[in-house]
Image: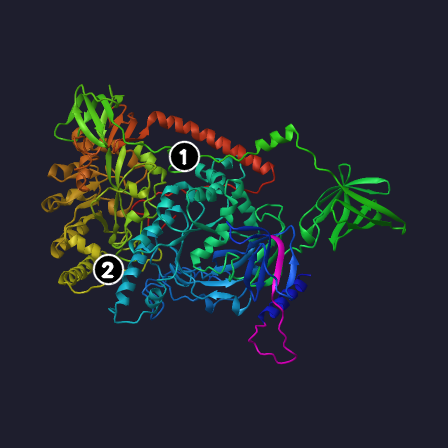
Amino acid sequence: MKKLLFLLFFLSISVIQAQDYFPTDSGVKTTQNTTVALINATIYVTPQKVIKKGTLLIKDGKVINVGKSVNIPKGTKIVDLSGKTIYPSFIDVYSDFGIQKPKRQSRGRVAQYEASRKGYYWNDHIRPDTDPLNDFKFDPRKAKDLLSAGFGVVNTHLHDGIIRGNGLLVTLNSTSSGILDTKSAQYLSFSKSAKSRQAYPSSRMGAMALLRQVYNDADWYAKGNMKNKDLALEALNKNKNLVQIFETGNLLDALRADKVGDEFGIQYTIVGSGDEYERISDIKATNANFIIPINFSNAYDVSNPLLAQNISLRDMRKWNQEPSNLSVLAKNNINFALTTYKLKSVKSFHKNLQKAIKYGFDKEKALAALTTIPANIIGNSTIGNLNNGSYANFIITSGDVFDAKTTIHENWVQGNRNVINDMNIKDITGDYVLSVNDKNYNLSITGKGAKQIGTLKLGDKKIKSKFSFKDDWVSIIINEESNYTRMLGKALATSNFIKGTAFDTQGNETSWTASKKAKKTANKKSKKKSADKTITVLPVSYPNIGFGNYTQPKTETILIKNATVWTSEKEGILKNTDVLLKNGKIFKIGKNLKARGAKEIDGTGKHLTAGIVDEHSHIAASAVNEGAQNSSAEVTMEDVIDPNDINIYRNISGGTTTSQILHGSANPIGGRSAIIKLKWGENADEMIYDNSPKFIKFALGENVKQSRSANGTRFPQTRMGVEQMFTDYFTRAQEYKAIKNSGKPYREDAEMETLVEILNGERFISCHSYVQSEINMLMNVADKMGFKINTFTHILEGYKVADKMKDRGIGGSTFSDWWAYKYEVNDAIPYNASIMHNVGITVAINSDDREMSRRLNQEAAKIVKYGGVSELEAWKMVTINPAKLLHIDDKVGSIKEGKDADVVLWSHHPMSIYSKVEKTIIDGKIFFDKNEDKKKREAIKQEKSKLITMMLNEKMGGGKTQVPMKRKDRNFHCDTLEELNN
């Protein structure tokens, strides 16, 4: 049967391929009358223009007229569609139809650093020259699935690479005329090509930096400045006026892609991921068109309470909230199209869309998202509507296309008819009383069209039977105790009554009937049951995980009374002192202060300090290393700030308010850092300091020469190679600076621009360091090449070189008592910080660890023990000293009038292990409150309980579930060499 269907499909394709200009070798070539009038239908010309009892007139694959009073030419084929509805066929604007994605090459034992393509860009993952027409093969099976779902046009491309080349706009006909546009769009992503093992980029920030450099190089190439021919850059420049469609994997990546586009004046159309509702105001601010998949998650199987504990609140919320995504986007007037992309089966598309509609998505907007909006995105006015002159791409349905009970009967593409479910087959579904041989059976018929099936019961007992329905004739074979009864009957026009003749095994003949049962009117109990099924969508918090804020903190006027104030200034520790915070600043410090309308906080018996500053951290980052090249000065941690990291909340619960988010130590010249305030709930851009000082991470030692890397072959492989690499790069930077200052045209190189900033004293170096010899080496290279080192971080042998650091004005940011965790650290001593401090170096205690970063108050206390540093000086090592090293001491790090209102209220002495943070205030906003934290913990328990009940109900109701999977918690630090991305 399947082979027969395929043959019929193939023959129909062959007919379609017989174009009017193709020659014929035999027989007589005749011209068919291609004018068809479909009359008496409800016609959706566009989502907003609907014609009742209208006529659609088509000829030669185009709409020639549509309306209530259409003049029908003689000889036109007329199709009466009374009771039927016509919609424009759907458009999937993001597809891989007909194009097979290449298999990813094995990584191999040796990393690939150079490009493998000659005559193209230096990076294999930049492939704007990809032309899908070369690989396109019409896929009849996929076409059938898409046609059955109502789609008539797909915009397809090869899903491979960071810049992926152009798109192909095709109709779901297998004819040459089905290709509408061979350059429909240019596609991009953050994912590397499967065709190459080239290591760079290995991170999200690397992909973003690569895109920026490609755009700069393409501009340089377009101006005729490159000596070599580059086919990739030529293709990129040819495609620059096409629609630019960017695939992203999550909400944060969508915002990151838009950020890159904005820098170069490009408005990407963004392929979203279904989580846009979590930061809808940020999504709206992109002003982008979106393409949204609707691959909703299944509920988790929470029947095992031990496994249920592994599910994060965020994942549980996702199941509950994501069906509302389309409604949220629409209500915020965000322009978006829908796609089947990421669905395991196209057959689930309508089911998911119907679910979204139940969650508030407007049907008119749903139709627009499948027709006019994708057509507008791709810039083609002849599809997605039934206006005069448009392609005759339309579907014929039994009713509302978004109703679960509606049948799609036919899908016409360019005037070619594709029968999905024969519209002439009666709908006989329902519950019947079947009477035969003095017995009454319960007959239940379900399904659609030719696939309508029936089941029989005698009372509550199911009877073995075989049911079939064809050409209005019902055939039933009943098997009761080896006594067969064969029945044949015809459904009458009303579809409420079936009658026919029955035969038993002896050939006896009798009549039978089946009468449809009247639908029961809803009683109070069923109404109550219906009310119980009301959809509940839990509110979104910021971020949308446990401990998130449902309302964002606002700047307040706050008066903290009668506290012990650790100023971290020359005033030292002030007893029984008031501090007034106003307009996000420390407004007044003194005794008996008053402020009308201020929120008063009693600080009696409590201690108030400046917020802790962590000079070296890797929290709140989606990636930590771009180690595929020995220099990654072109990348920036600002690109990969993750405001959803729970460690932000944990840090503010420990009094940390500012962190420098450093690149890892995979390469000698690492990436640029981000200095952020831990403003829990705000977005990534809002967390980054205004006019942030510029920093970069350098590194020395085992990590950069890849001592512990199984497949590292990248230069340098020795410590002496590290020295040569620094010399080489800064020699090149000096040459680049000279060309730049000459006023002559030059190729903008993001990596060199960063190194020139270092030479100019505009960007500061924080260098990962351990061994005395290497520390001396880098100081000598800096002296020779004319740049300065701001901070040696880790610096566990700082006590050996403290005099040289002091002479050069280099600060030290170290651990309190870490040692012996690798060979380089064998000479570390806990007195390191106090020795450097006594020499006169600005010393900070840092974390490099998500757990330590929320206990830096206790790390400071260790410095009092090891070296006899005073409590006040030790406290400065986690407040004003790191602020000085980061060049933000004019803003934070101490309690001083005019500085930012970043303060922490402690229950006891701040360096006591028994002390707890009661309030953490940043910019005059209370981001952590101990009492509110207790409420949040209880609310999380109640919410999880509610979600578990909802998921159990889903399972008991027959819904699909998924097995809980334990999530890996990321813990980035300097030695994290493997790349992890969102």
Disc 1 residue crowd, few under 14, some 14–19, many 20+, Cα 10 Å: many
Disc 2 residue crowd, few under 14, some 14–19, many 20+, Cα 10 Å: some
Q: Describe the element under mark 2 as helix, strand or loop.
A: loop
* x, y percent for residue 465: 77, 47
Q: CA distance from mark 2 to mark 1?
A: 42 Å
* x, y percent for residue 712: 33, 58
Horizontal relation, residue 410 to residue 428: left or right: left
Horizontal relation, residue 591 to residue 492: left or right: left
**Toward the viewer: 764 or 439?**
439
**Toward the viewer: 205 or 502?**
502
- Taking the magenta stretch, the answer to whether it contains residue 28 is yes
Total labels drawn: 2
Q: Are marks 2 and 1 in contact (CB under 8 Å)?
A: no
- Taking the magenta stretch, the answer to whether it contains residue 962 is no
Q: Describe the element under mark 1 as helix, strand or loop.
A: loop
* Magenta range: 18-41
On the image, numbered disc 2 is attached to which residue? 749
Res. 546 mark: 1
| Residue 392 visible to an observer of this rendering | no
Decide which of tag 2 and tag 1 comes sooner along the chain.
1
